[in-house]
Image: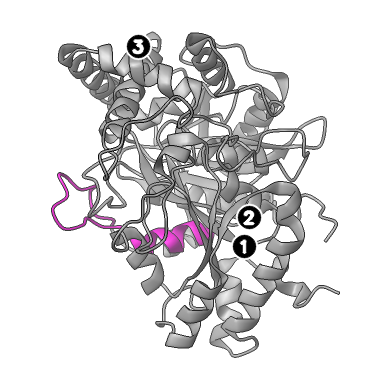
Amino acid sequence: MTSLPEYESFDGLGLAELVRTRQVKPEELLDAAIERVEARNPKLNAVVNKLYDYGRAAIAAGLPEGPFTGVPYLIKEIASQIGGVPTTRGSRFFADVVPPADSEHVKRLKRAGLVIFGKTNTCELGASLTCEPRFHGPTRNPWNLGLTPGGSSGGAAAAVASGMAPMAHASDGFGSIRAPASCCGLVGLKPTRARNTFAPYQGEGMAGLSAEHAVTLSVRDSAALLDATAGAGEGDPYAAPPPAGSYLAEVKAKPGRLRIAFTKKAPNGTPLERDPIRVLEETARLCEQLGHGVEEADPKVDGDLIWPAFNVLIATSLAVQLASHPKGHKPGPDDIETITRRTAEIGERTGAMDYMRASVTAHHIGRQMGAFHRTYDVLLTPALATAPPPLGHLDMMMDDVREYWRRVETFSPFTVWFNETGQPAMVIPIGVSGKGLPVCVQLVGRSGDEATLFRLAGQLEQARSWAHRLPKTDA
């Protein structure tokens, strides 16, 4: 019999309220989380490093009073560092890397009262929108075990969707929060560039494309988490504009009459399946019914430049990562996957001027979107172009590196766009496909304006609640 059966009926703030009012103890929540990992992880392979004693020790030492005191939390096996715990980045090559201290993001999560009790699976070096590393093995989608859960935060999304935890850490360099949230039916926010710090281990991720945050069951959890973690770290090269107030307060605030545009046109011309278009159109009509000004409008951007610029930035990033093992190691033939190696080899051949052109292109697209947002507060797009593909479709062991990246681009043409511009972009699981799978819509705000996204997402969540839509589990 499952202990604390109501565990999965609450989001993170709901569980924290149970602790605050002494209806449950943090130890009981941790036990409930561990029990679900032990029951469901053998099928899903979402959690690849179990830190149960680490979580118990944190509770025994006394948890700080914060918005999430006592709530179990999982950290992705890349980006944020836990001192004394390996950060493998989903790769055999980095299996022996143990950071000496917590990253600032992890420190802030702990100050919020969260109980870290494990690390989740990710693809190798975050270089995919699936989660199938050779090192840890594939993570499976709890909605359909034969499908990808998305990536690179696939372990996080599968864990939350299957009820192991109400939210989990994630990061996003070209869609790695939003794609898995979409595949698994969750809320996934990529914040504004530099909203969350990478201190002290990095100044920025992937030339400014990458951002850290989370996948969550509810909009309010995403907002409260961002309240807890946002802000510059010591020595950061730049910072996001400070928010006007609490993001959590924005979720319940009336958004007013927003000017909303929606586009069914992928910037790279990729054709879309019917379900993403249908759910986008339904969401646009709902926004109109809620009193917003809504019209179809395609942003005037040089869309054909977005993916070529990204290809340069990901290739050079992988090349630098593979040359920066803290012990000076060089990858052997069996240490890394084929796509990682071949993409990094492209990066090694890329000149400084090509890298700068790619960076300039990303900034140029950002200026074009800035002009678009002079007219519109929010842009709605499909989250993905297709349903989650079968495991093996985005195979990082395939020989044809160009075909691999073509498949990634075709699956998720709308996400990297906003990594390049640095704007906040959020997916919400507002629809269902003809096959019963979740379908998300992406909400994009002007740079620095997560507040408007939280207000609109909160309103849509209230109007079309998705809290009851989670995959069935057999444990």
Q: Residue 215's x, y, as percent? A: 54, 51
User: What amino acid is labelled 2 in the image?
Assistant: Val
**Secondary structure beneath disc 2?**
helix
Q: Which mark is residue 86?
A: none
Magenta-drawn stretch contains 397? no
The residue lying at 46 percent from left, 17 percent from top is 298
Q: What residue is shown with label 3?
A: 305
Q: Is residue 226 left or right of residue 214?
A: left
**Residue contact at pointers 1 and 2, CB within 8 angstroms:** yes
Total marks shown come to 3
Q: Label 1, label 2: how many angstroms apart (C-alpha)?
A: 5 Å
Front: mark 1 or 3: 1
Q: Is 301 drawn above or below residue 27 in the view shown?
A: above
The residue lying at 34 percent from left, 37 percent from top is 446
Q: Residue furthest bottom?
A: 22
Region in magenta: 220-243
**Secondary structure beneath disc 1?**
loop
Identify the mark nearer the N-term, 3 or 2.
2
User: What amino acid is labelled 3 in the image?
Assistant: Leu
What is the quadrant of the N terminus in the image? bottom right
Q: Nearer the viewer, residue 321 or 105?
A: 321
Mark 2 Cα within 10 Å, few/some/many (few <14, many 20+)?
Answer: many
**Secondary structure beneath disc 3?**
helix
Q: Nearer the viewer, residue 167 or 55?
A: 55
What is the quadrant of the C terminus in the image? bottom right
Front: mark 3 or 2: 2
Q: Residue 444's x, y, as percent? A: 44, 36
Mark 1 Cα within 10 Å, few/some/many (few <14, many 20+)?
Answer: many
Q: What residue is shown with label 2?
A: 160
The residue lying at 74 percent from left, 53 percent from top is 42
Identify the mark nearer the N-term, 1 or 3.
1
Q: Nearer the viewer, residue 360 or 130?
A: 130
